[in-house]
């Protein structure tokens, strides 16, 4: 064992270097070129969904590895375009967002209906589009944690997107409604052959106490 590493880790050296995970590697579905076949092929997803999922995995610099790199720029609605893009005004132009994803070799670009819809005819066939269906907004005071539907599955399909995404704030006052809305939207998206991506966050003020922030608890995340 490298003595320098042991020295740097100090009193935690033994516990860190001798650690053995309780879940063995054999029980993990690791990324690989056959990830879609190995993990998703026998699910109830329609074949059109599997085709679009394979397209996602086979695009960009990570194509064929089983790993994905998605450029997410959907925060304009929640935080305002000014807060999001003022440091780099070029990105007020939706085309530059998509260009960044292409030049960066991303598998896909995820953004709002407005951003992707503005450039769909020019770029939807050049990089996979993921349309974010719902959004929060921070203009209301006091702030609330509520993801509201802004876009429809049909709009995403008609612009040539290969996937739709949505967020659920688990633990929030409106999480039950969000679950129902997203479940119905994703069911319809699968009927149209679209991949579905769910972003999951914990949002509950009771999780924050003077002692700890339980949003970070391992059994919740």
Image (tube, grey):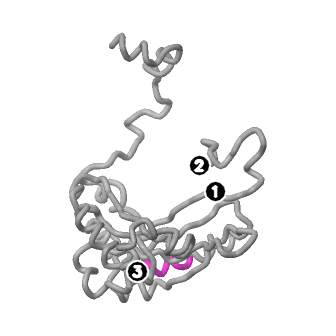
The part of the chain drawn in magenta is 184-191
Q: Are marks 3 and 2 in contact (CB under 8 Å)?
A: no
**Cα distance in 3D space between marks 1 and 3:** 27 Å
Residue 193 or residue 135, whichever sits in front: 135
Secondary structure under the numbered disc 2 in the rendered image = loop
Residue identified by numbered label 1: 202
Question: Residue at the location (30% across, 53% down)?
Answer: 67
Nearer to us of marks 1 and 3 is 3
Residue picked out by circle 3: 115
In the image, is residue 220 part of the stretch drawn in magenta?
Answer: no
Task: Report the mark closest to the observer, 3 or 2.
Answer: 3
How many residues crowd around disc 2 within 10 Å: few (fewer than 14), some, or many (20 or more)?
few
Q: Secondary structure at mark 3?
A: helix
The numbered mark, 3 or 2, whose residue comes first in the sequence reads 3
Sequence-first disc among 2 and 1: 1
Q: Residues within 10 Å of mark 1 (few under 14, many from 20)?
A: some
Identify the residue shown where x is 32% and y is 84%. 119
Q: Position of residue 5 (x, y in %)?
A: 38, 17
Structural distance between the alpha carbons of marks 2 and 1? 8 Å
Find out whether the residues at labels 2 and 1 contact each other: C-beta distance under 8 Å.
yes
Task: From the viewer's side, name the closer residue of 93 and 106.
Answer: 93
- Of mark 1 and mark 3, the one earlier in the sequence is 3
Residue 221, numbered label:
2
Q: Position of residue 1 (x, y in %)?
A: 34, 12
Q: Position of residue 137 (x, y in %)?
A: 62, 74
């Amino acid at each position: 064992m490298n003595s320098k590493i042991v020295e740097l880790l100090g009193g935690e050296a033994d516990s860190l270097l001798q650690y053995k995970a309780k879940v063995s590697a054999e029980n993990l579905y690791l990324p690989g070129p056959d990830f879609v076949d190995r993990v998703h092929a026998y699910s109830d997803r329609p074949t059109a969904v599997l085709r679009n999922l394979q397209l996602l995995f086979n695009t960009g610099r990570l194509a064929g590895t089983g790993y994905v790199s998605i450029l997410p720029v959907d925060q304009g609605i929640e935080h305002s375009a000014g807060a999001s893009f003022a440091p780099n005004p070029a990105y007020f132009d939706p085309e530059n967002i998509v260009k960044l994803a292409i030049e960066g070799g991303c598998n896909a670009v995820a953004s709002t209906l407005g951003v992707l819809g503005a450039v769909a005819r020019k770029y939807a066939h050049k990089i996979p589009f993921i349309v974010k269906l719902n959004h929060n907004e921070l203009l209301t005071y006091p702030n609330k944690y509520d993801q509201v539907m802004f876009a429809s599955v049909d709009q995403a399909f008609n612009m040539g997107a290969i996937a739709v995404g949505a967020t659920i704030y688990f633990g929030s006052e409106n999480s039950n409604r969000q679950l129902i809305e997203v479940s119905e939207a994703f069911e319809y998206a699968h009927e149209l052959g679209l991949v579905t991506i769910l972003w999951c966050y914990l949002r509950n003020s009771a999780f924050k106490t003077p002692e700890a922030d339980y949003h970070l608890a391992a059994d919740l995340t």
